[in-house]
Image: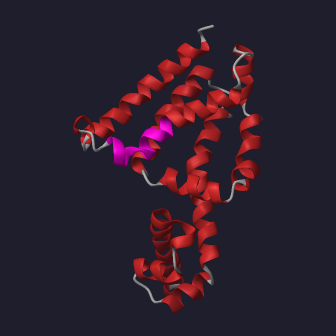
């Protein structure tokens, strides 16, 4: 039993190291040796557990993809919430998640750029069939749902992507940047709900 527990611990240690290195460097720039060094293990042991960089990457990418898109799919498909409540939940929950994981969007979006079918195969169909799309069409048939959701996500994600530039401004350094992003939890739903009810 002790050996099995140690094996599980080592496997998780390697996966955590892979999360750190892949998120920082991306797939192409990462070597298995980088992951082994991050985990504090030798390369032979890493290869014993995972055989290849590709296998580890797919594990990490599946986790990150679920983290990045899984939340929004669940929110948009909630049958018990209104359109306005969904907009609020997307802004509120996504901003919290991105502040806790600021490297996540650049990692996921970079890998989608390298493999665009990853998005279309796994996410696009779910968005089109979501309760959110149906509710939006019921309220405003003149609004293109793709414009709407892309604008919503862009207004949430872009400031986090642009943090290295934005945080150079004296008025938005350190905690001021986090407060600026948190303020958008209230502003984004306000802007989009105004858009919904203005013709």
In this view of the protein, which residue sits in the foreground, 2 or 123? Answer: 123
Q: Residue at x 56, y 24 (%)?
A: 85
For the rendered model, the colour scheme is secondary structure
Using the rendered view, name the quadrant where residue 148 is placed: top right
- Residue 130, percent from left and from top: 73, 33
User: Looking at this view, is 185 or 34 the one in front?
Assistant: 34
**Residue that protrudes farthest toward the bottom in the picture:** 44
- The quadrant holding residue 39 is bottom left
Specify start and end residues of the magenta stretch as a single range. 156-166
Residue farthest toward the top in the current orientation of the protein: 199
The answer, for residue 132, to whether it is visible in the render is no
Q: Is residue 57 magenta?
A: no
Q: Is residue 179 visible?
A: yes
Residue 31 in the image: state x and y as whole percent.
52, 79
Residue at 45% from the left image edge and 55% from the top image edge: 103
Quadrant location of the C terminus in the rendered image: top right
Q: x, y percentage for residue 40? A: 39, 82
Residue at x 74% of width, y 48% of height: 120
Residue 159 forms part of the magenta stretch: yes
Magenta: main secondary structure equals helix
- Please count the marks in the image: 0
> Which residue is at the far left?
170
Q: Is residue 4 above or below residue 126?
A: below
Identity of the residue drawn at 51% across and 50% down: 105
Q: Position of residue 196 (x, y in %)?
A: 60, 15
Question: Is 7 placed above or below 70 here?
Answer: below
């Amino acid at each position: 039993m002790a050996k099995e527990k140690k094996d599980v611990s080592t496997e998780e240690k390697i996966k955590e190291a892979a999360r750190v290195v892949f998120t920082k460097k991306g797939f192409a720039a990462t070597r298995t040796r980088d992951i082994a060094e991050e985990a504090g293990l030798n390369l032979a042991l890493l290869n014993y557990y995972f055989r290849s960089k590709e296998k580890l990457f797919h594990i990490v990418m599946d986790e990150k993809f679920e983290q990045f898109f899984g939340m929004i799919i669940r929110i948009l498909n909630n049958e018990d919430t209104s359109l306005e409540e969904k907009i609020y939940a997307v802004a509120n929950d996504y901003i919290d998640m991105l502040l806790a994981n600021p490297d996540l969007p650049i990692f996921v979006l970079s890998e989608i750029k390298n493999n665009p079918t990853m998005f279309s195969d796994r996410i696009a169909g779910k968005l089109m069939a979501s309760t959110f799309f149906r509710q939006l069409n019921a309220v405003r048939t003149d609004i293109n749902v793709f414009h709407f959701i892309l604008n919503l996500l862009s207004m949430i994600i872009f400031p986090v992507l642009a943090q290295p530039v934005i945080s150079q401004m004296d008025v938005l350094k350190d905690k001021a940047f986090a407060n600026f992003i948190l303020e958008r939890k209230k502003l984004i739903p306000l802007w989009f709900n105004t858009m919904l009810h203005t013709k």
